Amino acid sequence: MYRIRTFDNIAERGIAAFAADKFQVDEDLKSPHAILLRSHNLTIDELDTYVAAVARAGAGVNNIPVDVCTERGIVVFNTPGANANSVKEIVLAALLLSVRDIVGGMRFVRTLQDVKEEIDVGAKVELEKRRFRGRELTGRTLGVVGLGSVGSLVAKAALDLGMDVVGYDPALSIDAAWRLPSAVVRMENLSSLFSRSELVSLHVPANPETSSMINAETLASFRPGTALLNFAREEIVDVPAVVNALDTGILSYYFTDFPSSLLSGHERAHAMPHLGASTTEAEENCAVMAARQLDTFLRYGNIENSVNFPTISMEPSEGHRIGISNKNVAGSLGELLSVLADRQINVIDLINKSRGEIAYNLIDIADPPSEPMLSDLLAIETVIGVRAMPNELV
């Protein structure tokens, strides 16, 4: 039986996705085969010897030591797109709030609690409401930076609202390009997108290339009075530069999902407590997706939506399956097959895929793998990890 250790509060639908006769799932398990988490900051000490996979019920993996996992042959999964609709909806709320001073209007209404007569309340409302007059989104231009799962949904929703949409994503995948509405105008660079947009929404991951991508220099390309939305990652925005842009009028509003002491006192900075994926539907979708990925990996060795290993899948056969991770260097596959040939092991099927410096192999053999054979495979200099699987038929 496979042991799955959980951290955080994993949605019950995700836990229920594991077959009870094949998986034991609990937060207090020792020597787990896999770890399932959300926002817990996973430490190296929590990566026990038996851990073969870590799955995050969410898109980002900055709370997981991915480099260490890769060195140990541990596959790290995420769940791209599972919470995309929830994030899209909160971005739409921020878009509406950025052109209509709804927040200020509601604050004003709260000041009327001591007014006793309804006629006086009505008079005050009519007198003051002009202060909160806004504009419609229809006909305005939205710049979407990052056109993946969330960005493409935001772009489509903005088009449905009658907005013009320009987008920028130098790493746009073929699948994402197919999802993107043809009405989105692709921009060649960020500065051209910023100079054309009245509202800008960020949807990029946190990595060395995107760290502080919104800074004093890039903000200089913005149109005066632009509304900036960041529901992607905290690290992609230089907060002091944003505060200065709010003070100088470069930005009209800043809406974000990442609170900061620098933002808390600014009347045109509105931070939410990381609510983008905090819906029942998103948490359930992410948990179920992560559970299914761990299930198919632990039982069959197949990999989908990994951030450090190649995508790979092979249908179960009547044989016995071995999963082998190794450094992606020439001759490694030949060495693996030589060990099997020396023991006269018949190979039924195999598949080999690589990603960067890592290669991963699934090999189905006719006879059950012996401990000495597995030890010989692990002894190969380029091999990182070896795992035998029951390879049950489905």
Image: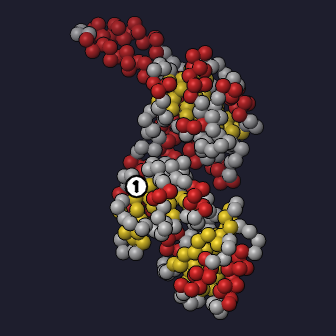
Dot 1 falls on a residue whose secondary structure is loop
Residue extending farthest to the left is 116
Q: Residue at (60%, 56%) from the top-left corner?
A: 67
Residue 153 placement (x, y as % from top left) = 56, 43
152 horizontally vs 43: left or right:
right
Residue 329 placement (x, y as % from top left) = 74, 68
Dividing the picture into quarters, in which one does residue 320 lie? Answer: bottom right
The answer, for residue 389, to whether it is visible in the render is: yes
Q: Residue at (30%, 10%) from the top-left corner?
A: 121
The N terminus lies in which quarter of the figure?
bottom left
The answer, for residue 82, to whether it is visible in the render is: no
Dividing the picture into quarters, in which one does residue 337 lie? Answer: bottom right
Q: Residue at (61%, 77%) from the top-left corner?
A: 378
Residue 148 placement (x, y as % from top left) = 61, 47
| Label 1 Cα crowd, 10 Å radius (few <14 / some 14-19 / many 20+) | some
Reply above or below: 134 against 61: above
Q: Residue at (69%, 53%) from the top-left corner?
A: 174
Reply above or below: 137 against 370: above
Residue bearing mark 1: 7
Reply above or below: 58 against 272: below
Residue 241 placement (x, y as % from top left) = 61, 25
In front: 144, or 327?
327
In front: 379, or 125?
379
Reply above or below: 363 against 155: below
How many numbered dots are placed on residues in this image? 1
Dividing the picture into quarters, in which one does residue 145 lie? Answer: top right
177 horizontally vs 102: left or right:
right
Check disc 1 and give the amino acid type.
Phe
